[in-house]
Image (tube, grey):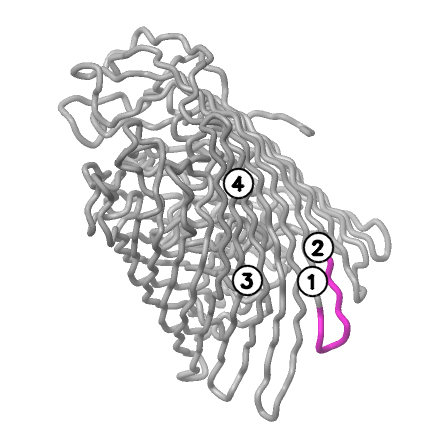
Amino acid sequence: MTMFHHSTAKALLAGTALWACPLWAQEDPPIPLDGISVYAADEGAEIDGYHSLAISSATRTSTPLRATPQSVQVIPSRMLADQLPARLAEVLYNASGAQGSVALQTPAFESTLLRGFPAEIYSDGITNYINAGDANALAGIERVDVLKGPNAILYGGGTGTPLGGIVNLVTKKPQPDRFATAALTLGSEALIAPSFDVNARLGQTALFRMTGSAARAGAQTDVLETRRYAFSPALTLGYGGATQLTVQGYLSRWQQQEYQGLPATGTVTGGFALDRDLFIGDPDIPESTTSTRKLTFTLDHRFNETWSARGQFRIGRTKVEQITQIILSNVPDAGDSRWSLYNSYVPGEQTEYNFNASVEGHLSTGAVDHTLLLGVDYARIKDYSLMYMDYAGSVDLTDPFAWPAWTMPASLAMGEGHGRYSTAGAYAQLQSDVGAWHLLGGVRFGYLQTVYESEGYGRRDSLQQARLLPRVGAVWDLAPQVSAFASYSEGMKANAFYFYSDMPEPEYSRQAELGVKFDQGAWSGSVAAFQIQRRNVPVTDPDDPLMLSSITEGQQRSRGVEADLVWQSEGPWRLVANYAYAAAVLTADIPNGARAGSSLAGVPRHSGGLWLTYDPRDPAGEGWQAGVGLYAASSAYIDLENLYKTGGYATVNASGSYTRNGMTYALAIKNLLNRDYDLPFWKYLDGRVAPGPERQVLLTISKTF
């Protein structure tokens, strides 16, 4: 039996534009080498190259990483520029225990995992719940902060606490200097992808910046052609003063034929083999689309040297239209190698409102220094979606010469739903430095409200829940360069975007973590052991013959060990490496389904990566540099019943660049050895398989003015 995600339904069963250049389905273009943005200061952080000293994402206060009682990995701009990642999943190779979304996935649901559990994508500390549009656009990203585990105290918006953690995208903000960079990337599968970054000073206290990217390409998978764009204008008023307002816009669109992966039979099991490049469905099927528009206001005010305040407000709207000819099983259901096909159409629209405000103060009581943070937040998501599905026919996937034509289905597979999900909270957090001890304690009063209406099913379900959610942690300086830490936190989350047999209970989570952090000159990093437990997880209702509705009776646990290392010599060498062991399992039987002890889908027991850069460029960035990296993962199941799993794999990426007089020529090669491997595409019904991208060669030419 399988879980069924209602918003995922849009991906499961179906899987104000400024500029629309097309996009490459397999990989997004790499970040152009931008001599300005690479070396610009990272907002809210103290960072030197690969070496991160302090960030604000984990505590919403500027806190040294060694004094933060939580596992945090920072992927700064210098690392992004060296590696030239083509999509967010490649960026996450630098963080232990992180699995990014599959390259071909429609951005109508998020499947990034941290520590074996679902993660959420945030931008500048505010949730991007569905992360629609061009979810892999990286041209406007300054750095990526990866926060592990439930973070309910500070991040309780959206529908509640992220489970596995947060991937916080820190965007590029206006700078006081004037500059402009234009870039063009050409690559495999006829990729063409322009991008730009323009920064201007409009006056003494007004700054403006705009980044943008677009792309178009085919893919190794038959039929697919992807187009996408993303634009991010930002205006800062009051720069340099006690009060500063930053207004940011975001406009993005993605379109491609819906890709549903391949069934387990014919890929990782079975007596026949399917073409790895097979696109399942009518080759002339209309494209699916997702788009998003967002407007964010950030107001900062410093009262004096002791007290400051910040407020953020974001409104966003997402539209999704998923069109597919889908199969419903991992095994042939219409003959020896024949599968039944179903025409599916899933439109949807979501509107998000997010607000948070906090006051920060720095106090002293005798020899003890304190940082106090008080805050409130509110978030509301309105979701409307439909799911139509009709039987289309059957096809032998080993010889698919005659596909039935896709036609608009008329039957409602799932009744129309109007979902409204609200969260609100008030929190207090105190950080205290007492000699060699760095203590953190906090509590959140969290409130959830869920209202779900379906005219087709004649139902209106509602739920309200309030709970106190604690967070405590301590760091002990064992030596001037080594510290030990321990922490405990809890979370609460609405079970949104599913279709339930009755009103679902909220999901609860808790995490315990302990570890060691070190920062010894050229070497820095951490080792951590963790356990996360969650209950009231959505699972398929055993009484539903169509397996479309869910009940909240699941229980899961993830425990493991992670290690992250950064080495930055005084010379031209830089290294980042990580390793994770994660045992993510069911701790209670699913009715008529998977048994307790079964591994969670999509989670390898072992994973890790490393990247080595040689950079002899001069201080102005002139000259050449090169790097090479490896990422490896063990086998992973694609389904909760653990019937099918992909094999382990390892891939090698390489990049290099040459810069002179503001002109940069950069070459990136993905999957250098052209290894064939499979990835779990686990969000589709009972799980699917997606082939890993073949070797890709990308050439980027950029000019900084």
For the residue marked with disc 2, what is the amino acid?
A: Thr
Left or right of 102, for residue 79: right
For the residue marked with disc 3, what is the amino acid?
A: Leu
| Residue that numbered label 4 is attached to | 131
Quarter of the image with the C terminus is top right
**Residues drawn in magenta:** 298-308
Q: Give the percent coordinates (x, y) of residue 182.
A: 66, 38
Instruction: In this rendered view, identify the residue nearer to me: 451 or 335.
Output: 451
Q: Give the percent coordinates (x, y) of residue 7.
A: 46, 35
> Where on the picture, by quarter, is residue 430?
bottom right
Q: Residues within 10 Å of mark 4 (few under 14, many from 20)?
A: many
Q: CA distance from mark 1 to mark 4?
A: 24 Å
Q: Earlier in the sequence, mark 1 or mark 2?
A: 2
Q: Earlier in the sequence, mark 4 or mark 3?
A: 4
Is there a contact, CB below 8 Å, between mark 1 and mark 2? yes
Quarter of the image with the N terminus is top left
| Residue that numbered label 2 is attached to | 298
Q: Residue furthest left?
A: 271
Residue 301: say if magenta: yes
Looking at the picture, does residue 203 appear above or below residue 335? Answer: below
Q: Secondary structure at mark 1?
A: strand
For the residue marked with disc 4, what is the amino acid?
A: Asn
| Residue that numbered label 3 is attached to | 154
